[in-house]
Image (cartoon, rainbow, N blue to C red):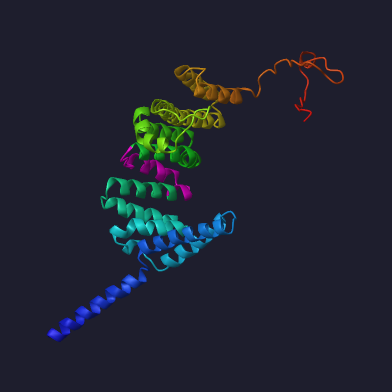
Amino acid sequence: MKQAIRLVAVLAAAACALASLAQGKDPAEVLKDIAALRTKRASEAREANKPLDVNGLNAEIKAMALEATAGVDPAKVDAAQAYDWAQVFSYAGKHKETCDLCAKFVASNPAPERKFSAQMLMLTSCNELGEGEMILMALPDVVLPNWSASQQLLRATLSQYAGTILVDKGLDAALKAIDDVASRVQYESPEDYANRVFAATKARNPKNPDGTPQTDEQIRATLLTQGKGINDSLKFSVVSKKASLLSEGGRKSTAVALLDSYIAEVGADSAYGKRASTTRTQLTIVGAVAPELVYDRKIGEFPGLQAWRGKVVIVDFTAHW
């Protein structure tokens, strides 16, 4: 009887081992191999004084990932390894499996930073699949452990997710997604930014135009300006993206009103007020009455645009150089 029990235990252990082998390599080891390949190819490119063949490298990485994921059933992957496997599946271009693995990992209640990374990978895979509705469902649940994560989510929404949502669910859904994510963004204060990067900036020994080293006060003043500029840039990118979507969706007047409101808020003479004014001009110039041309010299007969009102006129701007 004892021998029978012992035999059953041995067979069970062997079955577990075979199942483990069937699931492929340790995903953490696969990721290390991929990182090592990146380093190797970058080093080879530097030594050969040639640009890195990014497409070739990506093809190699995909081949490695496809080999590693062969025979791996996402449903049988342990939750503790689900995020590592999700990254490997993502490299392999298997985005449906990537989403499933990320969802399993997120459900295991990992640390906020790891949860955020998994949720971002899941959103990226949903985007690759063109699943705008899934993105809309997932966005509100994304955990934002810090200000940097919140800004990363907003940038990805503006550059990737909003476009997919637009195609899948329409303009209003895309605009709402942008507004919802923008409302959750945390901004690092210019003071905190200056404190965070002051030591590294000072170590670079920045100089004044006359070649003299900058004082601590000068460095800090520059960093405060940079910190404010970073926040202003992100806020403008939200307005710019929404204006672009509105204009392309046939709501040009609403886009112009949005830009006018933003310009009034930040000031027409501010850096981003001027950029918003340029965007406004680009949206409204088509169909507007052409202004008269002011010139010092001319070649041939040119009575001025006023004499040609109502006719099709092609104006070719050039320069002698």
Q: Is residue 109 visible?
A: yes
Residue at the limit of the structure toward the right, as seen here:
300
Quadrant in which the N terminus appears? bottom left
Q: Position of residue 135 (x, y in %)?
A: 41, 44
Q: Is residue 315 left or right of residue 152?
A: right
Quadrant where the image shows the C terminus: top right
273 vs 102, left or right, is right
| Residue 198 horizontal/vertical position (percent) | 38, 34
- Camera-nearest residue between 116 and 208: 208
Q: Position of residue 173 (x, y in %)?
A: 44, 35
Whether 29 is drawn above or below 240: the answer is below
Is residue 105 inside the magenta stretch?
no
Which SS type dominates the magenta stretch?
A: helix
Task: Name the residue: 50% across, 32% down.
Answer: 241
Q: Is residue 212 above or below residue 119?
A: above
The answer to which quarter of the image holds residue 182 is: top left
Q: Residue furthest left?
A: 1
Side of 174 relative to 279 (left or right): left
* Horizontal and vertical percent position of residue 204: 44, 38
The picture quadrant where one finds residue 75 is: bottom left
Residue 187 can be seen in this image: no
In the rendered image, the vertical position of residue 61 relative to residue 299, given as above or below:
below
Taking depth in this image into account, of 19 and 134 the one nearest to the observer is: 19
Q: How many numbered circles are shown?
A: 0
Which span of residues is magenta-colored? 126-146
Residue at coordinates 41% horizontally, 47% vertically from top-left?
Answer: 123
Image: 107 above or below 85: above
Q: Which residue is rendered at x = 26% and y = 53% of the image?
A: 108
Q: Nearer the viewer, residue 244 or 294?
A: 294
Tell whether position 140 is magenta.
yes
